[in-house]
Amino acid sequence: MGEKEKLLLFIVIILSLGLQLYFNGMTYVNALDNFVRIWKEILRLLVFLAH
Amino acid sequence: MAALSLYMLLSLFLFLRGLGIGSGSSNVVFTGMLFYAQVALTELSLGIANQLYPGYLIALNLLISTILLILTFRRYRDNIPDARADFKNAISAVKEIMRWENAGIFIVALFVFIWMAAALRFLPPRGIDDLFYHLPPIYESILQHKLVTLNINEGATMYPFLFPFNAELLFLWAAIFQHSQRSVDMVQFAAAIYAVAVIYALGRELGLNRRTAFFSSTLFLFAPVVLAQSGTTYVDIITNTCYLAGLFGALKYARSGDIRYLYLAGAAVGLMSGMKFNMIILGLALQLFIFLRPKTAYLNARRLSLYLFLCILLSSYWYVRNFILFGSPLYPLGAHINSTGILTISGGVGAAFFKDLLLKAKLLFVNDIGLGSLHGGYGILYWGAAFPSWIYCMWKSFRARQFTVLFFWLQGIIGILMLFAIPYDDFDFVPRYSLFAVGLGFLAFGKALTLFHDNRYKLLTLKASAIGLSMLAVIHLSNSICPVFDVDEAAADYINGTLRSPYKYLSKARWDLPSLATAWDALDYLTKDNSHPLYCYAAIYRSVLWLSPVYGSNLQNRVWNLMEQDAPDVPDAFLYHFSAQEDTLYLKKKIPIEDIATNPDYTLINQTSKTVLFIRKDYFNRENNKTLLASYYLKAYPASVEIAKRQKFESGIPIIAIPYFAGGLVYLQISGMLNNDVHSVLLGFEDRYVRNTKWPLVYTFINPLSGYRPLKVAEVATAEGPVAIYKNIRETQ
């Protein structure tokens, strides 16, 4: 397989990932607060169970 | 259940090793499919014979597995490799797999495993369709010890009860032994892990090394739709996994001509055709692999018959049932199409058709439609990296004239075409139908990764992106609204020792779930120690006819409306759920809420703006139930208990109150701190409730009684403003 072909595939993937992050990235990032809230309690639970 | 399942898996695994079937990964795919076939067939046999008891199910499966083990060690012992050799092989595989990127993905997986375990422990089944039609027939089958078809004459609303139910048989397996619905949510997660094994086997078949095959197959687990659906009793992960297993069997057969792989494909096609009608289309597509087999692989009539026999054996029950009951094996498919427009192209013909297609393509690629729910969301990694890789793999196999491989990749097109055939209005519910395309995409991504093995930085970029985006998908799970994965409140309650019913934790869910969950929570908690079922009447409007939670966590209750026989004349409990926009569906018999709200034999347990729950008063004559009621009000209405403690009532005078105030008063009465009879009554029904009594004095909240002279004795401050308490003195005639 030619190097140009590989490079083209790599560029397409990177561009496509970039576009996806542009379209939907914030939807994911906005979940961070909830994730931290839930995982604080899960970690507290794990510590509780470990004792 | 776990021990029996492990024993069955082990016996099948050794049997297949004895038969000398392929590599370790092939063996795992076969073992999973045959395990599923064994579960389905034993449940179907006992269910049809009206003998669906846990004991018989255990005995029958133990018998089959023991026979398989005896057969293996008697006839095929020499074929089973030395256990030490197997162990060494496994160790070398783990060494090859455990590189930095797989360690990274393993850490991401750890988050998922812990979260799913917590969700399984604390949260109830909480999808939408599962509460409506996937679970109630399964619970009825367990309770009636036979396969139950819920054939309720209510038109299109009830059609889903008549769909094929092979996938639901796995939920039955998870529920029947513990007589509980607590484990059913783990089935799809287990199926997702099995899907990873199948994709791994496919990757190995397509030439990926263990390291890359493991990496790319595990990414399937982190697609947002797979994560969201793993915590539900929908069936899309199960059906698509079956399809992937069938695809593996078909591809292996087409490439090697080994007939055993065709039989594997037959079992998969049979099982998946018995799950959803649309899987028949995918099953038919797999048949084309037969024509791609090597010329040396002779397919005689006997072999073909056995293959077809497997397909029919594992799917036919549901089609025969519908043929006998409704005259059409595909019922209610025809009626369903006419009534809902599913499987029609909404755009019409010409330019509108292409506009429709473009809109759908935009919804998929740009919006990742369904993201944040169990319906869809293939994820950034799929659309960004896996999808272009999949297109590349198709093009490359076409250019190399590898037609079997090309046909394999083309299966993804069928998945996407299936999506495009759904009307625009329903489009956001359907990406889950073609989950297998996500698996194929990640496989293609694995193939793409192998191209960059000589360029460290590109490989590092792609793998690190995959790990990061997988973690992002896990983070996004915390924003999922259907189903919810908020376990923080439950975890805190567990630590504080205030855990109640799992339905309590649906307060953050969407639609009507929080309102209904208030009633489900109380019903489940108050009946949790029941040795005899509580028969509950449910009147709910059509769009949210979610009945499975009424059975309770330990299937301790019965849905009175769904019982054909042995139901008592009068139900023990009544659950009403209303909407201003839709008519309420009164299944079996119409019992209006007015009849119950004014019936002194029933007490109002709780109410929200849309949901009301009543239970017979004599149910609380038993000391244990009375204590539970007090405990429920103390936990669920602590503010009400505090308000009640501050009030002064003259001893012996009955008190009529709505649940917000009655909760605390009932708690005090049961605890012996109040010498008044407390009656929990629906707001606005006070007059009708006391109509047949001769009480000279009655306390009421908010509304004074007509026919009585009201005396305002106190005022309670609430968040909604002050509430008056009246002492009503009966006027003499």
Image: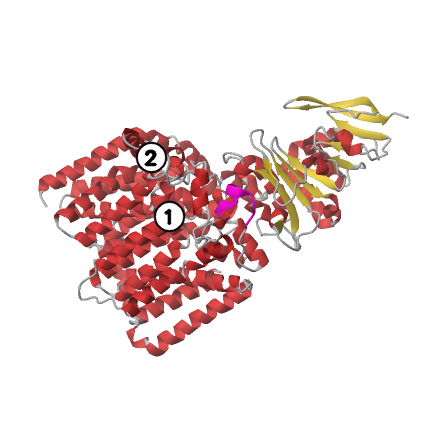
Residue B453 visible from this viewpoint:
no
> The residue marked by circle 2 belongs to what chain?
B
Can you give x and y, in whole percent of width and height, for residue B664 in the image?
A: 70, 35
Label count reads 2
Can you give x and y, in whole percent of width and height, for residue B76 in the image?
A: 32, 75
Residue assigned mark 1: B278
The residue segment tinted magenta is B151-160
Asked if the magenta segment contains residue B685, the reply would be no
Can you give x and y, in whole percent of width and height, for residue B567 in the image?
A: 66, 52
Residue assigned mark 2: B368
Asked if the magenta segment contains residue B155, the reply would be yes
Give the mark nearest the N terminus, 2 or 1: 1
Q: Amino acid at mark 2?
A: Asp
Residue B637 horizontal side relative to residue B395, left or right? right
Q: Characterize the magenta stretch by its predominant secondary structure.
A: helix
Residue situated in front as seen by the camera: B645 or B589: B589
Residue B365 horizontal side relative to residue A42, left or right? left
Residue situated in front as seen by the camera: B456 or B279: B279
Q: Amino acid at mark 1?
A: Asn
Is residue B211 placed above or below B686 in the rendered structure? below
Residue situated in front as seen by the camera: B539 or B237: B539
